[in-house]
Each structure stands twice: as structure tokens, then as C-alpha cells.
Amino acid sequence: MNKDIEKVQHLLFLWMCHYDKINYDTIKRYCEYLNIQFNLQITEHPAWTLFLPLFYAGNVDYCGSKSFKVTEPMMISHKRRHLFINKQPSIDGCKKLRPAIYRSEGPQNCELKQYTFNGKEILKHFPSVDSIISAFELSPKNDFSDLTFDNAPDQIGIAYTAFKRYYFVCENRKVVEIPNWSINPDSVNVAYQYSRVLGKKSNGNYDVEQRKLSVNSFRFPIMLYRVLMVASMLEGQCPYKESGNYIFPGISKSIVKELDRILCKSIRYE
């Protein structure tokens, strides 16, 4: 990550810590100010570069009505490794991985809320993307002339109007309306995953030998990203973005198996 951007992200995080919750429009304006103030030269949507990574990483969370708040500090552990979210511990050998995310090893005494991490068990509780889509509200829409389809030739999967109202056309031609971002920030992301499945496209690749998972970064579900990020970090690694993909080193095959179930068998094994 660009060090200047990482520094400004941390300033954005500290600014948000002063508020109980903040409307997204206010966050966007502050990101625009930071972009100018620190000459970051982000050409469009500074909030996408500065704020969204904090949201994806779990530093901040959605609290409804287009508002966000800083998440409660916590410690997440697996074996002898520990992650500290939103609180830097006063211990030697603690490594900063990202803004407000730190890692240490060995026994820890900590007053933060503590959680033991098991990525496979967490993902077992996630429904598959097709079942999520089928649970969305049915739409009476049967005229697709105003829709742009991700799978254009077949007119199946996710589609949207010029005003970014999202629909999903299932294989049986049943149409559901995708909940608005202000209702569920992950709903459109989930829809894109299943749309790729219907379009016979891959949602990711897993290198079995290197234990490295690569997924398309465009519209990847936030909750899945968080689980994979923590899993990678607790294996002594750190996820990164490369050529339009999120790369998660150190991911076990058992975690990928559950992810593949969630994404309807759309992960390719190498």
C-alpha cells in the first residue's frame, strides 16, 4: 500500500474515533478534503481509496441509515498469534500490518474483548450465494429493455438500471430486486458472485501447494474478505491487492473448501 495513503487512512480512522457514528456523505467530504490537503492525487472517489479499505478490514462497521462507526477494539487469536484491531497494545515485538491493525506472538495479557479464530467454522455458518439471492424479494419486472446485464448475451444474473437500481434474473427467469446499499452494503457484492457463477466464470483461484488464494476484487463480499484477511494475518502473512485481485497468502484448503461451497463451486484449484 502507498505509505502516504496509509498514513492518511490512519488520520481518517482517528477522526472517526471522535464520533459515535458518521454519515457516509460526511465521510466522503472529509476524504475529499484529505485528498487535497495531502496532495494524494486521487483522481476520483477519494472515499473509495481512503475509507472503504477501513470498512473492508473491519476497522469501521455499518450501523444503518448510511452511517458508520468505529468498531470496538478487540484481540483475535489463533494458536500463538494475535491480532489487535483498533488498539495498539503496549508490548514489544508488535507489528503494524495496516492502519489500526497489529500482530504479535506469544502469550498475551489484554483487557480487550478476546476471540479465538477458526475460519473454517465461521464460514460454515455462511449460506451459499444462490440461497441468499433466492431469499430476496420477488420483483414483478418483466421488461429488461432498461437493464444492463453483467452477463449481457444471456440476460441472466445481475442487472441494473441507469439509476443503479439492481435486479437479479435467475436461471428460471424469476426476478428479484437486490436490496439497496443503505439497507445491506453486501447484497450487491453477493449478487455479483452468483452472477459470475451463472455466467460460467470463476470467482477465484487457489494454489494448493503455495496455499495462496486469489479472488476478483471487484464486488467481493465484505464479510468474506474479513474472514480471509484475519486467516491470512494469523498465519503470519498479509493480504494484498494485485492486478484486480485480492491475494490471501497462507489460506488453508479447509477454509477454501467452505468458501467454494459459499460461492457455488466457482473457485478453481491449481
Image (spheres, rainbow, N blue to C red):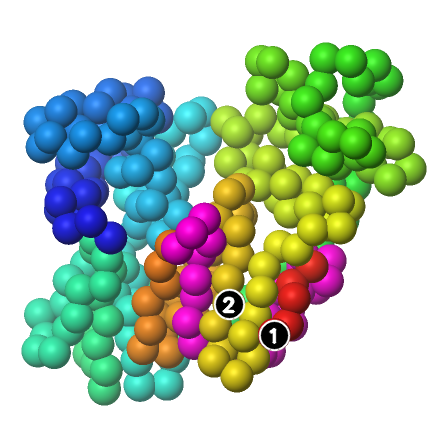
Q: Which kind of residue does numbered mark 2 sit on?
A: Leu
Residue in the foreground of this view, choosing between 244 and 229: 244
Write the residue at 49% across / 78% down. 211
Write the residue at 23% across / 86% down. 106
Task: Give the quarter of the image for residue 13.
Answer: top left
Magenta part of the chain: 242-265
Report whether 97 appears left or right of 137: left
Q: Position of residue 41 (x, y in %)?
A: 19, 30
Write the residue at 65% across / 17% down. 161
Task: Give the quarter of the image for residue 127.
Answer: bottom right
Report whether 135 appears left or right of 121: right
Mark 1 residue crowding within 10 angstroms, few (<14) / some (14–19) / many (20+): few
Q: Is residue 268 above or below residue 82?
A: above
Q: Secondary structure at mark 1?
A: loop
Residue annotated with mark 1: 270
Q: Which mark is residue 213?
A: 2
Q: Position of residue 94 (x, y in %)?
A: 15, 73
Say if residue 114 shows up in the picture.
no
Mark 2 residue crowding within 10 angstroms, few (<14) / some (14–19) / many (20+): many
Q: Is residue 77 above or below residue 20?
A: below
Report whether 195 appears left or right of 144: left
Q: Secondary structure at mark 2?
A: strand
Residue in the foreground of this view, choosing between 202 and 88: 202
Q: Position of residue 251 (x, y in %)?
A: 48, 74
Q: Is residue 161 above or below residue 195?
A: above
